[in-house]
Amino acid sequence: MIPQDPVMLLSFINMKLRDNYPSLEHFADDQELSREEIDTIVSKLKEIGYEYNPDRNQFV
């Protein structure tokens, strides 16, 4: 289950990206997330000042 709280979500996503996935797209595919669900995650994290950096494969 993906956390709904933005700060917990940030920690969860960055941990998953670091430990298991080479990109946000691979994470989304493996978790069977729709484009809308990924957009919601990205939006929630943007609201707290974090954006996905593909070079670092994390939200910074």
Image (cartoon, rainbow, N blue to C red):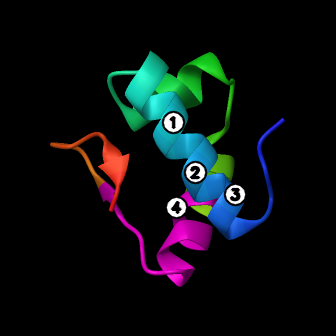
Residue 18 in percent (x, y) is at 39, 30
Residue assigned mark 4: 42
Q: Of the numbered discs in the image, which one, if any, rests on residue 11?
A: 2
Q: Are marks 4 and 3 in contact (CB under 8 Å)?
A: no
35 vs 53: above or below: above
**Which one is earlier in the sequence, the residue at label 3 or at label 1?**
3
Residue 41 in percent (x, y) is at 61, 57
**Which one is earlier in the sequence, the residue at label 4 or at label 3?**
3
Q: Is residue 26 magenta?
A: no
Q: What are the residue bounds of the magenta stretch?
A: 41-52
| Residue drawn 64% across the image and 66% down it | 7
In which quadrant is the C terminus drawn?
A: bottom left
Residue assigned mark 3: 8
Front residue of 50 and 38: 50
| Residue drawn 36% across the image and 66% down it | 51
Q: Is residue 20 left or right of residue 32?
A: left
**Which one is earlier in the sequence, the residue at label 1 or at label 4?**
1
Q: Of the numbered discs in the image, which one, if any, rests on residue 15?
A: 1
Front residue of 18 and 1: 18
| Residue drawn 77% across the image and 65% down it | 5
Q: Amino acid at mark 3?
A: Met
CA distance separating discs 1 and 4: 15 Å
